[in-house]
Amino acid sequence: MSQTHICFEDVTRRWGQTQVLRGINLNIARGELVVLLGSSGCGKTTTLKMINRLIEPSSGRVLIDGEDIAGKDPIALRRQIGYVIQEAGLFPHMTVARNVAMVPQLLGWDAGRIQKRVDALLDMVGLPSGQFRGRLPGELSGGQRQRVGFARALAAEPGIMLMDEPFGALDPLTRDHLQDEFKAIQKDLGLTAVMVTHDMTEALLLGDRIAVMDKGQILQCDAPAAILANPANDFVAQLLQTPRRHAERLGALGGQA
């Protein structure tokens, strides 16, 4: 069995009288890509942000490599974890190279090591360093900015990558290309990745496992094929209707051609 990298133990979260998470238990293996799937307000982003302590549990524990992260310095923890959000969140006044170099600089890497890392990462995400390192974010397309966001998240060689709707603002073609490229990079680097989405098709195509959430609970966590074959309840089955309906419509259109 694969080694557990991230572990949620009976995690709850309350905002005042509102119970946002209700007893989350989840083990994520090293090198696995787990998708947190559900509608807005179901608790998936709150769950994601527990891993880098942007949000703290009201009760329960989150462990990385068996260690309760409540005892770790949150700033140091975040510098060890890649984090990608929708629209990349780049600093507009900084060049592409400076955006990517930020965390290694904070960690005290020497200039030569940082430059080599920045150039290698830009090449890895399909933005040749000689062409893009000196540009400002405003000079890039949305897909290019998101690629820089991925490079920045990978800059300090993290073992964990957190992604909150990372492809949601992109056009379909760019989204498809970036999804495929990230999946290849994630497997090549052996990253443990946790991604938030409300898109069932995206979850099915990218996830090694999908944790379907509703009202602060995980209803089912399994491989995509297993969820397709055996949805745990009516809610999960309803989520599957959209990709199935799209597949049926495309099949019908193909039959008319």
Image (cartoon, rainbow, N blue to C red):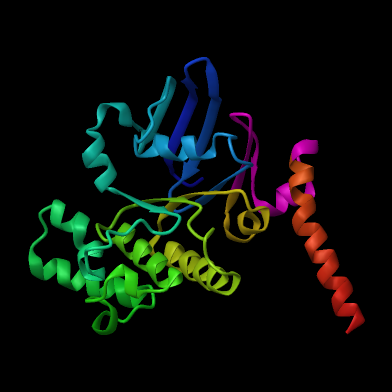
Q: How many marks?
A: 0
Q: Is residue 141 above or below residue 187?
A: below
Q: What range is drawn magenta here?
A: 210-235
Q: Residue at x 52, y 14 (%)?
A: 17
Confirm whether the magenta stretch covers residue 224.
yes
Residue 52 shown left or right of residue 203 in the figure: left
Residue placed farthest to the top in the image?
A: 17
Instruction: Return the residue nearer the eye: 142 or 176.
Output: 142
Above or below, 27 against 189 in this view is above
Q: Any magenta on residue 35? A: no
Residue in view at x 79 percent, y 44 percent: 238
Quarter of the image with the C terminus in it: bottom right
Residue 22 coordinates in the image, percent (x, y): 56, 23
* Residue in the picture at 25% in, 47% down: 79
Q: Is residue 231 above or below residue 190?
A: above
Percent coordinates x, y for residue 229 in the rendering = 78, 50
Q: Which residue is pictured at 89% across the width and 72% down the height?
A: 252
Q: Is residue 215 left or right of residue 69?
A: right
Q: Residue furthest right?
A: 256
Q: Quadrant of residue 231?
A: top right
In percent of width and height, residue 135 lies at: 26, 75
Q: Quadrant of residue 78?
A: top left
- Compared across the picture, whether 234 is left or right of 26 comes to right
Question: Picture coordinates of residue 72 (x, y %)?
Answer: 25, 32
Q: Is residue 35 left or right of residue 135?
A: right
